[in-house]
Amino acid sequence: MSLKYRPFAAIGFTTLLSLFLIIYFGELFAPVFIGAGTLLAVVSLLIRSVREKIVPILIAVSLIFSGLMYYTAQTKIDNVYKYYDKTAHISGKILEKECTNDRYYYTLDLNEIDGESVDSKLRLSVPEEISADYFDCISLEAHIYDISPENKGIRLYYYSDGVYLAAYSFGSVNPQINVKTGISSSFERFVFDTREMIKTRVADNIGGEKGATVTAMLLGDKSGLSDERVESFREVGIAPIFAVSGLHLSVWVLGLFAILRSLGVRKRLNSVIAIIFAVFFMFLAGLTPSVCRAGVMMIVLLFGNLFYRKADSANSLGFVAFIMCAINPFIAVDIGFILSFSATLGIITLVPVCEKHIFEKLPDNLFSSVLHKLFLPVVVSLSASIAVLPATIIMIGYVSVLSVISNVVLNYIAMLCMIMGGLGAALADIPFVSDVVFATSELLAEVLLRIVDFMCSWSLTTVSTENIFWKVGAIASVAIVIVCVFNFKGKNIFKAACIGLAANIIIFSLSSYFYYYNLTQVRILNVSDGISVVAYSGGRKIVITGKADSYDKIYAISDTLDYYGMNDPELFLIPDIKALEDNSNFLLMKEYNFNRIVLPYSNKSLESVVSKDRIFDEPRAVVGIFDNDRIQYMCCEDFSLAHCTFNDVEILLLFSSTVKSEIPDEYISADYLVCCGYIPYCINPTSYSEIIVCGPQKRSESIVKYVSERGANALPMNDSDAVVFNIREDSHKYFVLED
């Protein structure tokens, strides 16, 4: 059946893809899509043959609607902009709460700000826990600010959840906070009490990490799991088991449906009960985008039973996408929703093709039936893995090599573990039965964790996909599939898509190889009030950093190291005395297994973090890196610097200095200067091709002014900027400023 008879599929898919491109790649796409949609609509109305196909008109309407929805959502955000950087009286209802780094965070559904009604959520940070529960209303004085302006990914994550503002309280203790208890008989309270009951019963019967794993699979609540444990599930490709979605909902809703049908309940009444339970389960799982997508699809399917109509899967999925994008356009860039949507799309499109062209051609006998049951889970896993690949490449930045294997091996163990945990919580009042069920769930959780740990011990579990060739290739692959669907029919779609995707893989693989062959890439990171550098060449990575004890530094360096792949970095160089007391450096040493750690001097606290044989301390030294490259660093009371040579390109990193510093001439000579703080009198700004200025904005402005007055070029960096040098062995070089 063509898209002509699937109007919601055409509208929903186009809307989701358009909003994704507009939000993820830049708001300039909005007028482009509105213009393209208007042009296509005019052409469709004027040309009869195009108009009769219906699909062009549907796509035109979707393009226009996507652009308008984005502007509507952006206007909503602009309306709360007036509250940024302002101390105000806020009041709202508690929806979520968590504790991180001895700080308490609450997500509030805002009622008012300074007496004005506000339609937004707010993330509140306070130094001490508030004596309030979920759905209680609180009011207090707090300072409001823009939520994560320096990181687009984090900002869009909050926007997709409707959180447009952030706020924090002052001082070491809480300000005066008024609490109004929520209504205990409300539906929200009932949902909350049910969640807490399930969590308590699981924790009482399955302790520790195993119990936290069961709770995470049941409710999507990962608060009991460490970051390392969650990351291990991501590495093997089964982290989606914690994102309550279609698989979880199908187990419970269809299981209930089957039980009621076996008890003789009529189909229509059974469907009504299942719909009510599906809605309740969506609230129980926190109304996350993935469970909402699955829930609405399930409800559409069950409504078909009420009216004796079979729902079309693609149409239902498109309908869900359209409704959710209409409610909140930023859902189009929510990674959980995109992965859940992509996996479902892959299953409903690829699995039927395999059924038709492979399984249906097998002879009708017992062996074929067994073969079908054995390989169908593999086909489902492979279909979902293929479908989520473009989104994974673009939005996550690495691909799990083991995802297909782990999904086949572990998903059934995880689902059985979840079912047993849920049944145990439901049957907790029946001692012997619940004990057996909980014991089974605990055993399965133990097996699951052991297999995950075993897989994570393998040398290559993930492949980095952060470079531009992976991302462009992923977008091109999606475009190829869309073009094939619209231009070919039947088997020709599959053949054309295979040829196009194969050519796409070859082109971008060769392009990536020739681009990165003999390339050294150096990233200058502006981290709070300091400089950090990550350099990469031939699969080897080094880190050079000064003082900047902040989360921004850890995030920037970790993100860059992961960008280049998951193998161990070669060198961690700290040519700055002040940086030795930097807690963020200790955290980075614990997170990454650096082969060498070079610094002016070491101490006992450092030796407690890394082994002594990997520590080299010297206040002034020459360190060899990569092939013929090297770093000369020098550290004293007046200045700290590193003179780096990458393929004959010289970069001077001036971490700290005084105006009257006397730096030896052998260090001053370089092609580029990167500074943070004062530029000593002994340095002539005009002797550098470019001076890159890091650090806080006010300090940077004075340095840029000083450099410009002397006729030199200065490039100031914002908080989230990175200057990237691309240097080849033939000394060809260029650098770009990234946001």
Image (cartoon, grey):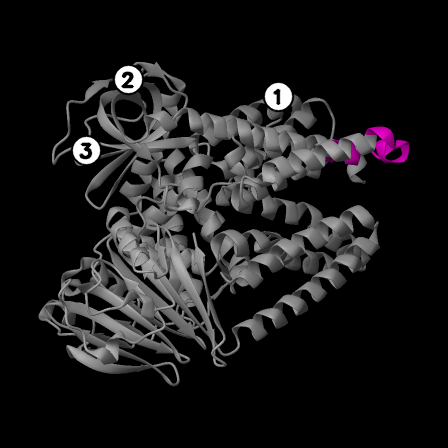
Which structural element holds mark 2? loop
Which label is found at residue 501? none
Q: Amino acid at mark 2?
A: Asp
Observer-nearest of 314 and 424: 314
Give the quadrant of the N terminus: top right
Cα–Cα gap, marks 3 and 2? 23 Å
**Disc 3 marks which amino acid?**
Glu
Picture residue at 89% right of the left edge, 31% below the top: 48
Residue 61: give x, y in percent of width and height: 70, 30
- Quadrant hosting residue 311: top right
Q: Which residues are magenta?
A: 45-59
| Residue identifier under label 2 | 114
Q: Which residue is mark 1?
A: 269
Q: Quadrant of residue 44?
A: top right
Mark 2 or mark 1, which is nearer the start of the sequence?
2
Tell me the residue that label 3 is attached to: 129
x and y percentages locating residue 241 in the rendered image: 47, 48
On the image, the x and y values in percent for residue 551 come to: 27, 52
